[in-house]
Image: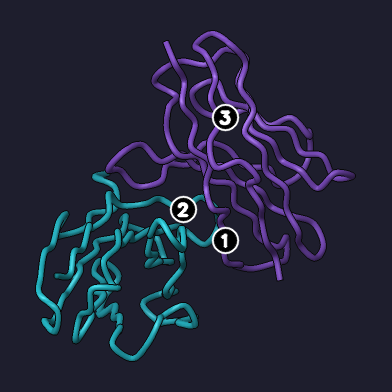
Chain colours: A cyan, B purple
Amino acid sequence: DAGVIQSPRHEVTEMGQEVTLRCKPISGHDYLFWYRQTMMRGLELLIYFNNNVPIDDSGMPEDRFSAKMPNASFSTLKIQPSEPRDSAVYFCASTAGTTDTQYFGPGTRLTVL
Amino acid sequence: AQSVAQPEDQVNVAEGNPLTVKCTYSVSGNPYLFWYVQYPNRGLQFLLKYITGDNLVKGSYGFEAEFNKSQTSFHLKKPSALVSDSALYFCAVREGKTGFQKLVFGTGTRLLVSP
């Protein structure tokens, strides 16, 4: 298995632009997570899905952030409009509900100028 | 609500010496505890976990961790450090309830192993 795949690996954009981050979980995993990592706040859980349904989005910072999972093999995290304080590394992770081990993607480094 | 604390931002150790990265936790009921490692420009990788049973858990790359219920700790250890062990280490906890529970991660401890 190729593991969790994220794209793009790096994204540089200007304030006010829309940003879309993509994730392909490991095949057969029924949970998908979006995390954000910054020096100031560490690793934060933004939202997670079970069987493509959002379960807990309490970590989503504000309405500018939205996430979707249209099918078992694809999820997006969208920021519209983006702001400089959104600059961070965004990780996607997946797991099978029968285990507790989360498998992380390589992350997307977002820079908002 | 569950939480985990990693009291050291950085741990420095010489290659060949034993290393310890500390973690304490707070959770209702029985804890499920985890260690993850993050190498530069990479995602987190699972190292080991404690669910139940033997208090000493062995994991990847020669790492082990000891669960201590009385001290609510789950320190990560390795008998002999390698320069390649230099990375960011995260402790995580979840409640041992039936069904899926979220993981709560600590702030991370940077391990620096000098040659």
Quadrant location, the N terminus of chain B = bottom right
Q: Do labels 2 and 3 share a chain?
A: no
Few, some or many residues within 10 Å of mark 1 (<14, 14–19, 20+): many
Q: Residue at x 28, y 81 (%)?
A: A68
Q: Is residue B2 left or right of residue A78?
A: right
Spatial CA span between label 3 and label 1: 19 Å
Spatial CA span between label 2 and label 1: 9 Å
Q: Are marks 3 and 1 in contact (CB under 8 Å)?
A: no
Q: Is mark 1 on a helix, strand or loop?
A: loop
Q: Which residue is drawn at 55% across and 58% down?
A: A98
Q: In this view, does A36 lie to the left or right of A78?
A: right
> Considering only vertical position in the picture, is A112 above or below B61?
below
The amino acid beneath tag 2 is: Gln
Few, some or many residues within 10 Å of mark 3 (<14, 14–19, 20+): some
Q: Are marks 2 and 1 in contact (CB under 8 Å)?
A: yes
| Residue underneath mark 3 | B59
> Considering only vertical position in the picture, is A87 above or below A19?
above
The amino acid beneath tag 3 is: Gly
| Residue underneath mark 2 | A102
The amino acid beneath tag 1 is: Leu
| Residue underneath mark 1 | B103
Q: Position of residue A47 (x, y in %)?
A: 42, 75
Chain label for disc 2: A
Q: In which quarter of the image is residue B75?
A: top right
Q: Are marks 2 and 1 on the same chain?
A: no
> Considering only vertical position in the picture, is B57 above or below A105?
above
Q: Residue at x 30, y 62 (%)?
A: A88
Q: Is mark 3 on a helix, strand or loop?
A: loop
**A18 or A32: nearer the eye?**
A18
Quadrant location, the C terminus of chain B = top left
